[in-house]
Image (cartoon, helix red, strand yellow):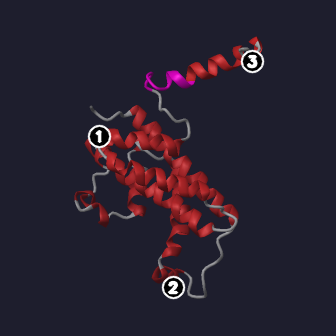
Amino acid sequence: MSRLLIPRPARERAYPIVRDVIARRTDGRPKHTEPLDAFVDELDKLGYRPFRLWWAQTVAELRLTDPNTAPVSASILGAALVEGALTFIVKHPRKNGQFQSKDYEKEPRTWKIDDLVASAASGGPSAILDLSAKTRAEILIRSRQRIHAGRMLSDYPAGPPDIRPEEARDAKATAEHVMRAILDWLQKNPTSP
């Protein structure tokens, strides 16, 4: 039986990449480099392991959504992930002096995405979201409001403008941008075991 040999130059290029992938399993870095995928591992640390499947399914659905043919769906799914991540982290920054509004002592179903974004952007240098992430999230929130007919009647009495495909593509990018900011903040402020 003949053995397939991989040429030495190809092995030399592949070895550091394979070594890095394997090292990610044990060296403390996230297993995933993509922020939406990496957040699923944070759910365990934050005490929300049962939501891993929900998170993974929502991320998969966002990835499969074509912003050209389903721009509203892409915007809503992007906003759902932003709202979800901010909801899941509320307890942790509260211990560090952020998210101090009395609203966060109430049931999570009463929390509003607008308030979650504003709270995550407060706190000066220790804020979770910088001005860029906050601004992008606020634009995403306005897009997401299309799911509320009453809000559209109030905001757009003559009828809502169409969501353009580039706005839907930006919704996906915004979800990734906000998630990266959250992951970076969690890395600087790890949860206690």
**Amino acid type for the residue under numbered disc 3:** Ala
Residue that badge 3 annotates: 10
- 142 over 31 or under it: above or below: below
Q: Position of residue 151 (x, y in %)?
A: 47, 79
Residue that badge 2 annotates: 153
Q: Which mark is residue 43?
A: none
Q: CA distance from mark 3 to mark 2?
A: 61 Å
Tag 3 secondary structure:
helix
**The furthest residue to the front:** 1
Say if residue 180 shows up in the picture: no
Say if residue 40 shows up in the picture: yes
Residue 98 shown left or right of residue 106 in the figure = right
Dot 1 or dot 3: first in sequence order is 3
Residue that badge 1 annotates: 96
Quick one: quadrant of the C terminus?
A: top left
- 138 over 149 or under it: above or below: above
Tag 1 secondary structure:
loop
Dot 1 or dot 2: first in sequence order is 1
**The furthest residue to the bottom:** 158
Q: CA distance from mark 1 to mark 3?
A: 48 Å
Q: Residue at x 42, y 33 (%)?
A: 187
Tag 2 secondary structure:
helix
Q: Nearer the viewer, residue 125 or 157?
A: 157
Task: Specify the principal SS of the magenta part.
Answer: loop
How many C-alpha atoms fall within 10 Å of the one at disc 3: few (<14), some, or many (≥20)?
Answer: few
Q: Position of residue 54 (x, y in %)?
A: 41, 54
Say whether marks 3 and 2 touch (CB < 8 Å). Answer: no
* Range of magenta residues: 21-28
- 124 over 134 or under it: above or below: above
**Amino acid type for the residue under numbered disc 2:** Leu
**Between tags 3 and 2, which lies in front?**
3
